C-alpha cells in the first residue's frame, strides 16, 4: 500500500485540534482525492466538531473508494442510527460482528446499545474495546456509567479511576464521571479533587457550578474556594461568582478554629485523630496521584509521606494504606505493596467499607497480573536458551 498523506492530519486529530485536522486532511485530499485514510480522518474530525452531515458525505466518498472499509461503514451506521434509520443499526451490528472488527466498530456499536437501553450487550462491546486498546479512556468511562446504573458503586469508581489514568490534557470526561461517583457515595473530598482536575481541563460555567455545589454540600470549603477562584479568574465580572466567593468566605469565617499552641505550629501526637484533617490529607494524596500519571518516583514518595501522616493518627485507615500500596507498586517494591494491600483489605472488611475493599482487591489483582506478566516474559526470554 502506498504511503498515505494523512499523517499530519491524524496527529492533529489525536491532539484534539479538530479544525486544524480538517484543514490538513482537506489539503492532502487535493493531492489525492481518493486517499482512504485522509477521507476517514476527515470524517472523524468532522464528527468531533458535530458536523454530521459533512461527515456522512465524506464517509460516502470513502465507501465509494473502499466499499469494504469496516470502520467507515461503522461510522456511517452510527450517524444513520442517530437519525432513526434502522439501516444504521444493522450496519453497526454487522461491522461489530465482523471478524476484522477493531476498537471503533465495537465502541460505536456499544454506544448505540447504551442509547437503546441494552446495557448487558453494550458492556461486552466496551470490554472488547478495552482489550483491543487498553489506553483509551472512553470504554472505561462507559463501563463505569453502566456500573452506576447497576448500582455497583465500587465497580463504577474502579472503571472511572482507570479512565483518568489515560485521559489527555484536554479530556475532562473521566474526571467528571469520577467526581460524580464520589459525590453520590458522599466522598466529598475525593469528589472535590476530581472536579478540580476536570475544571483544569475544561473550564466551563456549568461544570464550575456543579463542582461548587458539590464542595459546599460536603463542607469542603477550601476546595470550594479554589473552585470559585478558578471561575473568577476566567470571568471576574460575573456577579454569581462574586456571590459564591462571599458564601464560601462566610462559611470559612464561621468555622470553629482549633486552638494554636505557643510558638511554632503544634505537632500532632500519634493516635490523635483531631490533630489533622484526614479527609483533606487523603484528597491531597489523591490529587497528586491523579495529576501526575504515570506517577514519577518523587511524587510517589510525597504521596507516601502524606499517607503516613494519616496512618499515624488513624492506623486502620484502609484508604491511606491503599495509597501507600499503590506507591510501593509504582516504585517496584512489590512485596511491600502486597503487604499493604492485604492490610488494607483486612481493615476495609472489618469496617464494612465496600469502596475501600474494592480498591484494595483491585490493587492486589493488578499486582498479581504484573507478576504473571513478568514471569511470562522471563519464561519467553529463557525459552531459546533452553532449546540450545
Image: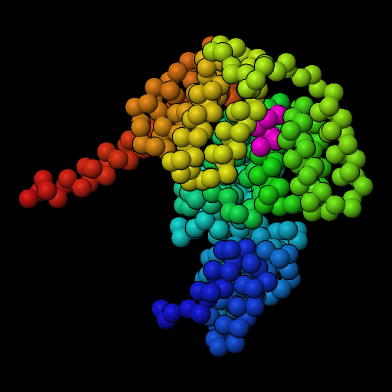
User: What residue appears at the point 67 percent right and 16 percent down from the top-left corner?
Assistant: 261
Q: What's drawn in magenta, residue-wise?
A: 188-193
User: What residue appears at the point 68 percent right and 46 percent down from the top-left corner?
Assistant: 198
Image coords of residue 223 (percent x, y)? 73, 35
Q: Is residue 156 above or below residue 174?
A: above
Per the picture, the main secondary structure of the magenta-coloured stretch is helix
Image coords of residue 40 (percent x, y)? 58, 71
Confirm whether residue 75 shows in the render.
no
Residue 191 covered by magenta stretch: yes
Confirm whether residue 235 shows in the render.
yes
The one nearer the camera, 241 or 69, is 241
Image coords of residue 320 (percent x, y)? 53, 24
| Residue at the extreme front | 263
Q: Is residue 341 above or below residue 68?
A: above
Residue 39 covered by magenta stretch: no
Image coords of residue 141 (percent x, y)? 61, 44
User: What residue appears at the point 85 percent right and 52 percent down from the top-left corner?
Assistant: 236
The quarter of the picture where the N terminus appears is bottom left
Amino acid at each position: 500500500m502506498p504511503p498515505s498523506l494523512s499523517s499530519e492530519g491524524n496527529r492533529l486529530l489525536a491532539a484534539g485540534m479538530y479544525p486544524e485536522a480538517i484543514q490538513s486532511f482537506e489539503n492532502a485530499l487535493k493531492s489525492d482525492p481518493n486517499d482512504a485514510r485522509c477521507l476517514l480522518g476527515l470524517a472523524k474530525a468532522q464528527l468531533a466538531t458535530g458536523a454530521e452531515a459533512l461527515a456522512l458525505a465524506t464517509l460516502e466518498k470513502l465507501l465509494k473508494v473502499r466499499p469494504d472499509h469496516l470502520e467507515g461503514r461503522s461510522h456511517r451506521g452510527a450517524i444513520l442510527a442517530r437519525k432513526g434509520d434502522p439501516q444504521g443499526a444493522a450496519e453497526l451490528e454487522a461491522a461489530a460482528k465482523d471478524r476484522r472488527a477493531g476498537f471503533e466498530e465495537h465502541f460505536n456499536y456499544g454506544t448505540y446499545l447504551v442509547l437503546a437501553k441494552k446495557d448487558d450487550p453494550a458492556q461486552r462491546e466496551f470490554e472488547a474495546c478495552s482489550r483491543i486498546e487498553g489506553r483509551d479512556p472512553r470504554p472505561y468511562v462507559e463501563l463505569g456509567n453502566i456500573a452506576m446504573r447497576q448500582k455497583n458503586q465500587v465497580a463504577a469508581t474502579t472503571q472511572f479511576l482507570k479512565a483518568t489514568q489515560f485521559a489527555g490534557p484536554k479530556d475532562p470526561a473521566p474526571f467528571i464521571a469520577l467526581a460524580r461517583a464520589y459525590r453520590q457515595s458522599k466522598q466529598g473530598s475525593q469528589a472535590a479533587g476530581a472536579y478540580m482536575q476536570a475544571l483544569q481541563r475544561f473550564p466551563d460555567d456549568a461544570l464550575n457550578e456543579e463542582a461548587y455545589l458539590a464542595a459546599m454540600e460536603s463542607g469542603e470549603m477550601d476546595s470550594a474556594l479554589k473552585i470559585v477562584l478558578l471561575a473568577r479568574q476566567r470571568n471576574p465580572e460575573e456577579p454569581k461568582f462574586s456571590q459564591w466567593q462571599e458564601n464560601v468566605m462566610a462559611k470559612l469565617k464561621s468555622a470553629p478554629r482549633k486552638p494554636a499552641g505557643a510558638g511554632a505550629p503544634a505537632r500532632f501526637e500519634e493516635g490523635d485523630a483531631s490533630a489533622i484533617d484526614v479527609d483533606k490529607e487523603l484528597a491531597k494524596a489523591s490529587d497528586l496521584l491523579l495529576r501526575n500519571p504515570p506517577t514519577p518516583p518523587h511524587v510517589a514518595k510525597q504521596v507516601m509521606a502524606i499517607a503516613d501522616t494519616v496512618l499515624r493518627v488513624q492506623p486502620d485507615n484502609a484508604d491511606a494504606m491503599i495509597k501507600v500500596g499503590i506507591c510501593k507498586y509504582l516504585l517496584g517494591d512489590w512485596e511491600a505493596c502486597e503487604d499493604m494491600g492485604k492490610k488494607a483489605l483486612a481493615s476495609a472488611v472489618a469496617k464494612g467499607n465496600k469502596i475501600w475493599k474494592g480498591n484494595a482487591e483491585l490493587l492486589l489483582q493488578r499486582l498479581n497480573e504484573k507478576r504473571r506478566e513478568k514471569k511470562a516474559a522471563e519464561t519467553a526470554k529463557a525459552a531459546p536458551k533452553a532449546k540450545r
